[in-house]
Amino acid sequence: MRNACSSRRPRGRASNWRAEPVRALAAVFLLCAGAAAQAADYLSVGENAAVLYDAPSREAKALYVVSRHYPLEVIVNLEAWVKVRDHAGALSWIERKLLTDRRMVVVVAPSAQARQQPEEGAPLAFVAAQNVALELLGVAPGGWLRVRHADGANGYLRANLVWGA
């Protein structure tokens, strides 16, 4: 016979009924945080040339000069300065006013053959050399990106040939 004042707890899964909502919320939070961490934010240089610094100040050491349309991955976004990563993985700071939301990618392969359709056997649209910036127009199935060359030519190329997507 069971005593009404018994401190005995039920055994097994039923004993964790209070913990289940907390676990479910934690799982949802981790899934959302993981998805946000994978979705990189990119900006591109909007001026003819922009200086990248080692700290968020014009008084800091100038590291590199990058040209118009060069894509940069946003790491930290302050009011007037943005900490960025370039295609080589180097971290630096740039003034926010020098950046634009225009999506660009840079060719990292020795050359990139853009096709008229997102298929390996499709006719050639254009060829872009290494370090050429291309406007990102969209993402196509199968690992293809739709891009536009500065001369206006459009085409599809493999995502692994560029950085910034």
Image: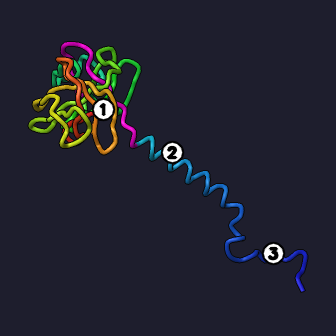
| Identity of the residue drawn at 71% across and 64% down | 17
Residue position for label 1: 73
Quadrant of the image containing the N terminus: bottom right
* Residue 82, percent from left and from top: 33, 25
| Identity of the residue drawn at 66% across and 60% down | 20
Whole-angstrom CA distance, mark 3 to mark 2, is 39 Å
**Range shown magenta:** 38-55
Viewed as shown, does residue 141 lie left or right of 34?
Answer: left
Residue position for label 3: 7
The earlier-in-sequence mark between 3 and 1 is: 3
Quadrant of the image containing the C terminus: top left
Viewed as shown, does residue 37 lie left or right of 147?
Answer: right
Residue position for label 2: 32
Viewed as shown, does residue 33 lie left or right of 71?
Answer: right
Density class for disc 2 (Cα within 10 Å; few <14, some 14-19, many ≥20) is few
Q: Is residue 55 visible?
A: no
Q: Is residue 111 visible?
A: yes
Density class for disc 3 (Cα within 10 Å; few <14, some 14-19, many ≥20) is few
* Residue 147, percent from left and from top: 25, 28
Q: Please state which amino acid type lies under the numbered disc 1.
A: Glu
Whole-angstrom CA distance, mark 3 to mark 1, is 57 Å
* Residue 150, percent from left and from top: 19, 19
Element type at mark 1: strand
